[in-house]
Image: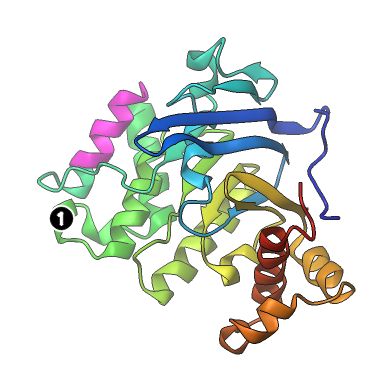
């Protein structure tokens, strides 16, 4: 059976969900985008939500930050119930959705000033934080450039910086490296590890297997369900000790590029076949 997240919150639980469901009415009927998810993200982790498109990653993150309401279940951030006190939660988090709305006709500096104002960071506090974030993101030499003229990687760095003006304890990033080149991906992950070293707890979603292996712990999502929660190393070890799916052997095994990817695809195939139902 797959390993799952701790079912009870503890003193070091930063993000916690229990029996989290979110359904949508569609032309095809009721769809469960999030189907009973349990998460328990601890202080000082980079925790990854891993899964293909349509797995439920974005919906889960929107539930966590209070952008949409759950059909049922509990979400807490640092012990604060998100549904009951969303304003208190927002003071603790920085949230970067897949399509973060930078203003292309504003310069880097003007975008930073705009988002700092939204967070109530003004005056000398703004100037100090601006200097820190420009140095952190290596955007010092680009402050007068329009956001729309920046490369994809630089736009991601600017978006990340705009979400850090209020020094959040928790950073929630929905596929932050989607659409950027490999060098920019590595640079962005370097920034995330820098933030981790400063005490920020990070929840990041990604479809990339190599990025999953950089996380402290991960949850593998598929069809709105958590198939596994634990360390990447434990997933690889656990799948090596279990019989391989014959369907995987015949189908996609030749295209697999890493032991982690093999373990991930094997777990999904077993779920499809009902070998490890949740």
- Drawn side of residue 95 relative to residue 2, left or right: left
Query: Which portion, as a residue range, is magenta?
Result: 110-121
Give the residue drawn at x 65%, y 42%.
199
Label 1 sits on residue:
148
238 or 104, nearer to the observer: 238
Taking the magenta stretch, the answer to whether it contains residue 116 is yes
Residue occupying the far right of the picture: 241
The residue depicted at 54 percent of the width and 22 percent of the height is: 71
Residue 147, image x, y percentages: 18, 52
State left or right for residue 265 relative to residue 94. right
Residue shown at 85% from the left, 71% from the top: 237
> Depth check: 116 or 89 in front?
89
Give the percent coordinates (x, y) of residue 33.
51, 39
Q: Determine the residue located farthest toward the bottom in the rendered image.
A: 254
Q: Position of residue 202 (x, y in %)?
A: 59, 45
Whether residue 243 sits left or right of residue 105 in the image: it is right
- The answer to whether residue 150 is visible is yes
Residue 181 versus residue 80 in the image, above or below: below
Q: Quadrant of residue 238?
A: bottom right
Of helix, strand and loop, which mostly describes the magenta segment? helix
Q: Quadrant of the N terminus?
A: bottom right
Determine if the magenta segment contains residue 77. no
Q: Is residue 258 above or below residue 219?
A: below
The residue that appears at 57% across and 19% down in the rendered structure is: 82
Residue nearest the observer in this picture, 246 or 254: 246
* Up/down of 164 relative to 274, above or below: above
- Image position, residue 185 (x, y; %): 45, 68
Determine the secondary structure under disc 1: helix
């Amino acid at each position: 059976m797959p390993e799952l997240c701790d079912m009870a919150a503890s003193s070091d639980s930063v993000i916690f969900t229990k029996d989290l469901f979110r359904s949508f009415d569609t032309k095809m009927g009721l769809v469960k985008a999030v189907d009973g998810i349990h998460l328990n993200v601890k202080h000082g982790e980079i925790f990854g939500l891993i899964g293909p498109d349509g797995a439920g990653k974005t919906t889960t993150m929107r539930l966590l930050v209070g952008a949409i309401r759950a059909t049922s279940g509990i979400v807490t951030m640092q012990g604060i119930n998100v549904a009951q006190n969303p304003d208190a939660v927002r003071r603790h988090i920085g949230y970067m959705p897949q399509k973060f709305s930078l203003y292309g006709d504003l310069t880097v500096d003007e975008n930073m000033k705009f988002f700092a104002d939204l967070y109530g960071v003004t005056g000398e506090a703004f100037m100090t934080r601006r200097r820190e974030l420009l140095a952190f993101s290596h955007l010092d030499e680009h402050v007068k450039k329009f956001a729309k003229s920046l490369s994809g990687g630089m736009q991601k760095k600017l978006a990340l910086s705009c979400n850090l003006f209020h020094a959040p304890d928790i950073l929630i990033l929905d596929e932050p490296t989607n659409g950027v080149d490999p060098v920019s991906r590595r640079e962005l992950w370097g920034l995330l590890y820098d933030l981790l070293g400063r005490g920020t707890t990070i929840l990041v979603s990604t479809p990339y297997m190599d990025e999953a292996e950089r996380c402290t712990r991960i949850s593998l999502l598929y069809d709105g369900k958590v198939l596994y929660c634990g360390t990447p190393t434990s997933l690889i070890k656990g799948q090596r000790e279990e019989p391989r799916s014959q369907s995987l052997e015949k189908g996609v095994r030749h295209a697999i590029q890493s032991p982690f990817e093999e373990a991930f695809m094997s777990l999904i195939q077993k779920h499809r076949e009902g070998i490890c139902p949740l």
